[in-house]
Image (cartoon, rainbow, N blue to C red):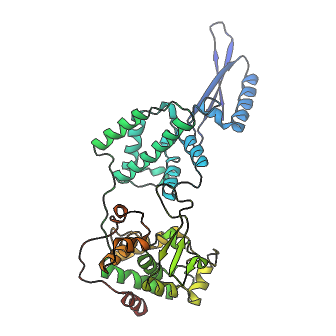
């Protein structure tokens, strides 16, 4: 809302200063003021100007063109132009940036101090969105995604972005270890953790008839198919080639873009046994309550899968274990069975050994539970 202040001049006349202040999501703070000879004229100006700004929000940037956008506006424009091209993780990172204070900074006026402030805010946490502090690798990823927007704006929108200045700033942040690349993760569930999780979810499934998530079988599917949550929930029965024992997964995660990246993974005996578990009438009927496509092997929400798993780990006191680690576990099991790198890739669908290497633990394990032993743990619960 606008405000009006009156003041008397030296000759006794009164002037009315009308001021408009607007704080709108994804836009920089907007201020504008004018002085008038009467209060009525000032009120009319505020009313007319606020209506104009409401109908044309791009005016909040200071100019009615694409050469003076805020970070938030630029991200929104960028996401619209590259829709369906990049991975969900990249898109979600950019959407999060739109909610943070840096989104209100103007693209052409972005300074090193703005980037430094963002880094400090992420290290400390952001209470307004109930965001906890994050690792230096997470902050580096956010800045890398922001740079992709800046680069796109420089090339495609003909904006005079100082990418060299941005790169010098991030280089200094790396030098002072405020941001850093992610470390190689080598966390596998141990036999006791697997037992605890499988029996916890099996009991929950039996005791809570309203539960739609057979997490004990979902965990086994993640291990023996080497699939991510999002991939398991996109496995259509029609894409299973029973003769060749392969299952087609569409739009796989890929740094070059997931759209159209369709591949078949090999379904081994252990995975086939788990798939049969999902065909049980009670399992299917309870999953169908989610309202998703019945032609899916797992017609459930992938985000809820991760959430259910995280809650269980807290209850069971299992630390530093992520659902994605089951993909690591699956690849490691294939290596321990003596499969060659190309054979492991036929299941994991990694494009290269260099990428797959992150997921295969070379440590020799003394005890590995077979699929039959794991299923028996579920029956015992």
Task: Pick whichever, 288 or 241, lies toward us.
Answer: 241
- Quadrant containing the N terminus is top right
Image quarter for residue 262? bottom right
Vertical order, 363 against 274 (above or below):
above
Q: Residue at x 41, y 83 (%)?
A: 198
- The image quarter containing residue 286 is bottom right
Q: Quadrant of the C terminus?
A: bottom left
Q: Is residue 314 left or right of residue 290?
A: left
**Picture quadrant of residue 359:** bottom left
Q: Is residue 294 left or right of residue 329?
A: right
Residue 127, position in %: x, y?
A: 45, 51
Q: Residue 117: where, in percent of width, then height?
A: 40, 40
**Above/below status of 56 relative to 279:** above
Please tell me which residue is depicted at 38% across the width and 44% down the height of the picture.
119
The residue drawn where x is 64% and y is 35% is 58
Q: Position of residue 192 (x, y in %)?
A: 31, 82
Residue farthest to the top? 11
Classify 71 as above or below 37. Answer: below
Query: With respect to residue 221, does 48 lie above or below?
Result: above
């Amino acid at each position: 809302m606008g405000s009006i202040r009156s003041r008397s001049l030296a000759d006794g006349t009164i002037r009315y200063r009308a001021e408009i202040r607007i704080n709108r999501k994804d836009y920089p703070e907007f201020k504008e003021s004018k002085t008038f000879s009467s209060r009525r004229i000032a009120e009319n100006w505020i009313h007319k100007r606020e209506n104009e700004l409401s109908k044309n929000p791009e005016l909040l940037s200071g100019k009615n063109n694409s050469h003076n956008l805020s970070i938030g506006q630029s991200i929104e424009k960028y996401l619209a132009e590259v829709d369906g091209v990049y991975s969900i993780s990249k898109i979600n990172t950019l959407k999060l940036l739109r909610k943070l204070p840096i989104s209100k900074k103007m693209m052409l006026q972005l300074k090193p101090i703005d980037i430094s402030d963002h880094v400090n805010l992420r290290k400390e946490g952001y209470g307004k969105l109930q965001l906890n502090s994050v690792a230096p690798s997470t902050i580096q990823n956010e800045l890398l995604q922001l740079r992709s927007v800046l680069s796109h704006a420089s090339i495609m929108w003909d904006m005079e972005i100082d990418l060299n200045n941005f790169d010098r700033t991030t280089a200094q942040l790396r030098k002072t270890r405020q941001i850093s690349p992610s470390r190689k993760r080598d966390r596998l569930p141990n036999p006791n953790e697997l037992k605890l999780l499988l029996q916890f979810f099996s009991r929950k499934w039996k005791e809570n008839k309203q539960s739609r998530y057979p997490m004990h079988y979902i965990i086994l599917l993640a291990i023996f198919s080497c699939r991510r949550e999002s991939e398991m929930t996109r496995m259509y029965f029609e894409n299973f080639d029973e003769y060749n024992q392969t299952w087609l997964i569409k739009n796989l995660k890929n740094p070059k873009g997931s759209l159209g990246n369709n591949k078949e993974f090999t379904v081994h005996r252990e995975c086939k046994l788990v798939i049969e578990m999902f065909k049980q009438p009670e399992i299917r009927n309870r999953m169908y309550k989610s309202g998703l496509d019945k032609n899916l092997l797992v017609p459930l929400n992938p985000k809820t899968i991760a959430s259910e798993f995280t809650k269980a780990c807290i209850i069971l006191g299992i630390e530093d274990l992520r659902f994605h680690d089951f993909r690591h576990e699956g690849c490691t099991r294939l290596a321990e069975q003596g499969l060659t790198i190309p054979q492991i890739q036929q299941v994991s669908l990694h494009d290269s050994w260099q990428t797959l290497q992150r997921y295969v633990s070379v440590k020799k394990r003394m005890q590995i539970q077979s699929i039959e032993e794991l299923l028996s743990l579920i029956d015992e619960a």
